[in-house]
Amino acid sequence: MNKILGYLLICAGLMLMLFSVMGMYKVFADRQPVAPVVQMADLRINTQYGPMQIPMQGVNQIANLGLFAVLMMFILSAGAKLAGVGNGMLKAERIHDALLQIQAQNAPAEQTLKKL
């Protein structure tokens, strides 16, 4: 049972990592627009020479790209954690099987444990 769950966790982790890497590639290669999370209106300030309008489009784009990168890095790290947990489950199952084999064969434990 642990082997099946371990392999499922590894596959799920790899899928999450692939999703996040492909998402970042599509956005940063200008193939897909980033979702507008931050939308700031143009800034209007009054100076001694009269009112001045500062466009915030560049700031919006940088903020949205930054937030998207942080989200994708979070998803990437979650996928890595899932794959690590699955790997740990498989390793524990392998050690358990080796210890059972030692008990069944009454073989010297040193030789069998070196194979791990």
Image (spheres, rainbow, N blue to C red):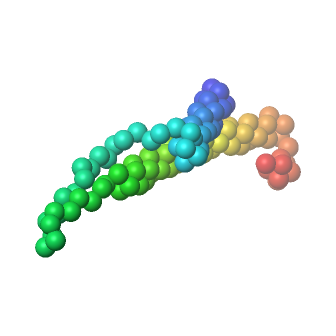
**In terms of depth relative to the viewer, which is nearer, 45 or 104?**
45
Residue 13, image x, y percentages: 58, 38
**In terms of depth relative to the viewer, which is nearer, 110 or 46?**
46
**In terms of depth relative to the viewer, which is nearer, 43 or 3?**
43
> Residue 51 vs residue 38: left or right?
left
Residue at left 86%, top 51%?
Answer: 111
Q: Quadrant of the N terminus?
A: top right
Residue 59, image x, y percentages: 35, 56
Q: Is residue 76 visible?
A: no
> Residue 65 vs residue 40: left or right?
right
- Direction front: furthest residue: 49
Residue at left 73%, top 36%?
Answer: 97
Vertical comparison of 42 with 102: above or below: below
Q: How many marks?
A: 0
Q: Is residue 60 visible?
A: yes
Residue 51, image x, y percentages: 16, 63
- Direction bottom: furthest residue: 48
Residue 101, image x, y percentages: 79, 37
> Residue 38 vs residue 68: left or right?
left
Residue at left 60%, top 34%?
Answer: 15
Residue at left 67%, top 38%?
Answer: 90
- The answer to which quarter of the image holds residue 23 is top right
